[in-house]
């Protein structure tokens, strides 16, 4: 399993030269955290890239400058990543305390306006021939484990839309269920969600699993295979000022590894 994940990571890095986030003409694209290794020994740093596109785990890549914030939350407290430039990022220091860690990232909120001449990264006010306009928010999480201590990963970060895993994926195997809770503005949220794993499909926007949360925000994903997994949820509401924008969209995802 480890060799398979490392192979995916090597392919991802090799693709950096040709698949780097560049233009906004891809409004439906979404970002995710892709760890080099989600299960590391004490004394090593965490490394990751930000995937970008429609196909998990390999598509395009987003530069860290597109991010507003990255946090590493674990037994040693919370670290805020100060250097967000570049494609490949890592923790500012090696992680020495064993246990479970949550890496949480927030993309800079961005206006995307579609016109007859293409996409613009700005509100629709003042533009001509507008077809649609949206303010986009995206939030990412990844679960990592250092050593064999395990631990809880149900940390609530405070993102507007958030997926909270209620079990440590390190304790799960194919056939098990991962319980989750979805929050919107800090409250339980009834919604549909999708999940998939690396190798399930090479097609765009194809997922292995679809389910819903209840009024209490609770749902569960059946683990179908080992490997890198992603859970994704999205939501749209009318924008508060229709002269500026039509809709406000929220996206959250969470990635983790199953042995």
Image (cartoon, rainbow, N blue to C red):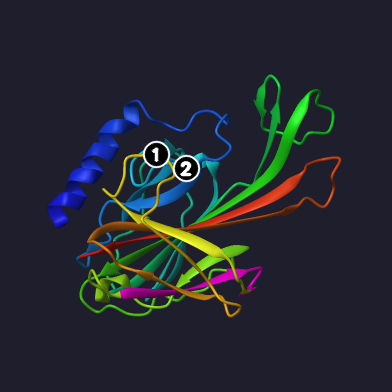
Q: Secondary structure at mark 1?
A: loop
* Magenta highlight: main SS: strand
* Segment tinted magenta in the rendering: 177-187
- Mark 1 surroundings within 10 Å by alpha-carbon count, few (fewer than 14), some (14 through 19), many (20 or more): some
- Quadrant of the snapshot with the C terminus: bottom left
Instruction: Give the spatial CA distance, label 1 vs label 2.
Output: 6 Å
Q: Is residue 157 depicted above or below 52 in this figure? A: below
Residue pointed to by mark 2: 64
Q: Secondary structure at mark 2?
A: helix
* Viewer-side residue, 255 vs 74: 255
Q: Is residue 66 depicted above or below 172 in this figure? A: above
* Viewer-side residue, 140 vs 196: 196
Q: Is residue 185 magenta?
A: yes
Q: Is residue 128 depicted above or below 33 in this figure? A: above
* Viewer-side residue, 185 vs 116: 116
- Residue at screen point 25% across, 72% down: 175
- Quadrant of the snapshot with the N terminus: bottom left
Residue pointed to by mark 1: 87
Q: Would you say residue 72 is visible in this rendering?
A: yes
Q: Where does the image place residue 95, in percent across and percent down from the top left? A: 30, 65
- Residue at screen point 82% across, 40% down: 244
Q: Residue furthest top?
A: 117
Please report contact status of discs 1 and 2: CB closer than 8 Å, yes or no. Answer: yes
Q: Would you say residue 44 is visible in this rendering?
A: no
Direction from residue 166 to residue 24 in the image, left or right: right
Q: Where does the image place residue 162, in percent across and percent down from the top left? A: 55, 65
- Residue at screen point 19% across, 49% down: 6
- Residue at screen point 36% across, 39% down: 203
Upstream in sequence: badge 1 or badge 2: 2
> Which picture quadrant has residue 123?
top right
Q: Where does the image place residue 14, in percent across and percent down from the top left? A: 26, 33
Q: Where does the image place residue 173, in percent across and percent down from the top left? A: 23, 71
């Amino acid at each position: 399993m480890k060799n398979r994940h490392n192979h995916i990571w090597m392919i991802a890095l090799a693709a950096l030269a040709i698949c780097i986030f560049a233009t906004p003409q891809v409004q439906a694209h979404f970002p995710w955290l892709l760890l080099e290794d989600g299960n590391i020994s004490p004394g090593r740093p965490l490394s990751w890239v930000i995937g970008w596109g429609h196909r998990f785990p390999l598509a395009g890549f987003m530069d860290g400058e597109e991010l507003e914030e990255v946090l590493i939350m674990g037994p040693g407290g919370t670290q805020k990543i100060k250097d967000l430039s570049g494609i490949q990022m890592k923790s500012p220091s090696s992680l020495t305390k064993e246990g479970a860690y949550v890496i949480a990232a927030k993309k800079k909120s961005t206006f995307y306006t579609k016109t007859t001449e293409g996409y613009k990264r700005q509100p629709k006010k003042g533009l001509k021939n507008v077809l649609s306009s949206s303010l986009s928010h995206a939030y990412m999480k990844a679960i990592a484990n250092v050593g064999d201590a395990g631990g809880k990963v149900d940390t609530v970060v405070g993102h507007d839309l958030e997926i909270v895993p209620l079990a440590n994926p390190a304790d799960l195997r194919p056939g098990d269920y991962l319980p989750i809770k979805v929050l919107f503005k800090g409250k339980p949220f009834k919604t549909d969600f999708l999940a998939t794993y690396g190798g399930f499909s090479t097609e765009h926007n194809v997922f292995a699993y679809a389910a819903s949360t209840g009024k209490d925000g609770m749902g569960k994903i059946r683990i179908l295979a080992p490997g890198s997994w992603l859970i994704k949820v999205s939501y749209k509401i009318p924008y508060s000022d229709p002269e500026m924008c039509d809709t406000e969209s929220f996206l959250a995802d969470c990635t983790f590894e199953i042995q």
